C-alpha cells in the first residue's frame, strides 16, 4: 500500500537521523516539517496565533492528504523519541522552502513559486511563509 509506505519511509528516515544525532551526542536538533501540521485544524480559534498546541490531530489530517497524515505521524513519533532519549528537538513548520530543487521533476511547491512571484491569485487563501 503506497500510503502506508509513504508514512513508514518518512518516519523511518527521520527517526534514523535523530538516532544518529543521539549517538553522536548532539544535544539539539531542528526538524523541518510543514505548515500542514497546523493549517487544517478546524477547532483552532481564528483570532489565536498558531503554535505547537494548534497542531491538527492525525485523523483530521487524513481528510486532506496522506502527505499531511505522514507529517502528523512523524511529528508525533519524533517528539516521543526526543522525549525518551533526552534530545532537545525543535520543529520548524514553514509553508514553502525556496531553493534548488532536489528532485528532477517539478512538484506542487515548485510549480506554485513562479505563480506567487508573478502575483497570480492563489488557489487557496493562505499567507505564504517563505524560507
Image: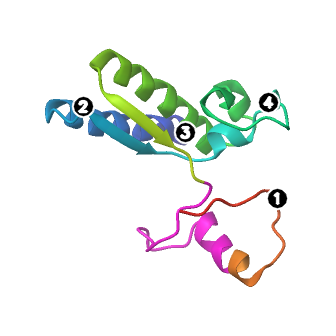
Q: Cβ–Cβ below 8 Å for labels 2 and 4?
A: no
Instruction: Name the residue carrying label 2.
Output: 19
Quick check: is 116 in the magenta stretch?
no
Using residue 1 as the reference point, say whether residue 36 is left or right of it: right
Instruction: Name the residue carrying label 4.
Output: 44
Quick check: is 96 in the magenta stretch?
yes
Find residue 72 and report its image quarter. Answer: top right
Specify start and end residues of the magenta stretch as a single range: 95-114
Find residue 127 and report its image quarter. Answer: bottom right
The answer to whether 53 is drawn above or below residue 3 in the figure is above
Inter-mark Cα distance, 4 to 1:
18 Å
Q: Cβ–Cβ below 8 Å for labels 3 and 4?
A: no
Where is residue 34? Give x, y as percent: 57, 47
Instruction: Name the residue carrying label 3.
Output: 71
Tag in front: 2 or 4: 4
Q: Residue furthest left?
A: 24
**Mark 3: few, some, or many residues within 10 Å (few <14, many ≥20)?**
many
Inter-mark Cα distance, 2 to 4:
33 Å
Instruction: Name the residue carrying label 1.
Output: 124
Q: Tell me, what colour scheme is on the image?
A: rainbow
Which of the marked residues, 4 or 1, is nearer the chain's N terminus? 4
Image point (85%, 37%), residue name: 46
Tag in front: 3 or 4: 4
Inter-mark Cα distance, 1 to 2:
37 Å
Which of the marked residues, 2 or 3, is nearer the chain's N terminus? 2
Inter-mark Cα distance, 2 to 3:
18 Å
Amino acid at each position: 500500500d503506497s500510503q502506508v509506505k509513504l508514512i513508514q519511509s518518512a518516519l523511518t528516515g527521520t527517526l534514523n537521523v535523530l538516532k544518529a544525532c543521539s549517538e553522536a551526542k548532539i544535544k539539539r536538533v531542528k526538524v523541518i516539517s510543514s505548515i500542514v501540521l497546523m493549517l487544517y485544524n478546524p477547532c483552532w480559534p481564528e483570532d489565536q496565533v498558531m503554535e505547537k498546541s494548534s497542531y491538527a490531530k492525525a485523523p483530521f489530517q487524513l481528510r486532506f492528504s496522506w502527505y499531511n497524515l505522514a507529517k502528523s505521524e512523524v511529528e508525533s513519533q519524533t517528539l516521543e523519541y526526543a522525549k525518551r532519549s533526552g534530545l532537545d528537538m525543535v520543529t520548524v513548520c514553514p509553508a514553502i522552502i525556496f531553493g534548488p530543487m532536489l528532485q528532477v521533476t517539478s512538484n506542487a511547491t515548485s510549480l506554485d513559486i513562479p505563480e506567487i512571484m508573478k502575483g497570480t491569485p492563489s488557489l487557496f487563501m493562505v499567507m505564504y511563509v517563505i524560507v
